[in-house]
Amino acid sequence: MTKNLQILILFLALPLLGHSQENDKINWINFEQLEDSLSVKPKKTFVYFYADWCVYCKKMDRNAFKNPEIITKLNSDYYAVKMNAESTDTITFEGQKFYNLQAETQRNGIHQIPLLLASRKNKEFSLPAILILDEKFNLKKREFEYLTSKKMLQLIIAH
């Protein structure tokens, strides 16, 4: 009888443990998923461009993007898109195909999407790059620097 009770408790507790683990990370999606999500329910969008070699990107991954307040805010109020700026994948978004054209000529070429969304006039493309877009996909804010948890939280609360 005791063994049956222990098994029953275990089965009842497993879904609760799984649920708490889902809320301890950001629900990152890609651009294809974003397009589908926006068509179902318009919502603000948070876009994070990174690269594997970017020290500040790795630091934000370890710190700001592990902060429970940031996780909760991004998961509840935004579609969070994370993209490696050097991706060689072909991405279809809003009926257009986007590529990493520089990958053919440069070892670490930058994909078209980050170049289109996160380039600045008279400045070289830099990482990390964060974009905040409203429900209609209009740009509200761009950041091109390491953000502490405090600054990241201020950014996503303000927009």
Image (tube, rainbow, N blue to C red):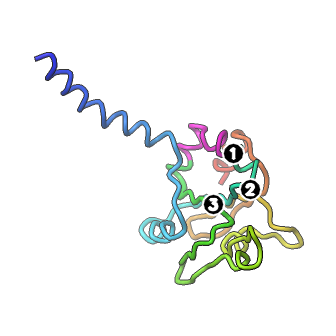
Instruction: Inspect the image, locate mark 2, and give the three-letter code of the amino acid beneath it.
Output: Pro
Left or right of residue 76, residue 17 in this image: left
The residue sitting at 14% across, 23% down in the picture is 4
Badge 1 local density, few (<14 within 10 Å), some, or many (20+)?
some
The residue sitting at 69% across, 63% down in the picture is 140
Q: Where is residue 53 in the image (x, y as percent from the top left)?
A: 73, 54
SS state under label 3: strand
Instruction: Inspect the image, locate mark 1, and give the three-letter code of the amino acid beneath it.
Output: Met
Residues at circles 3 and 2 in contact by the CB criterion of under 8 Å: no
Nearer the camera: disc 3 or disc 2: 2
SS state under label 1: helix
* Viewer-proximal residue among 44 and 63: 63
Write down the quadrant of residue 44 in the picture: bottom right
- Residue behind mark 3: 47
Q: Is the magenta stretch mostly helix, strand or loop?
A: helix
In the depicted structure, whether residue 130 falls above or below residue 153? below
Left or right of residue 39, residue 98 in this image: right
* Region rendered in magenta: 60-73
- Residue behind mark 1: 60
Mark positioned earlier in the residue sequence (3 or 2): 3
Find the residue positioned furthest to the left. Answer: 1
Instruction: Inspect the image, locate mark 3, and give the three-letter code of the amino acid beneath it.
Output: Val
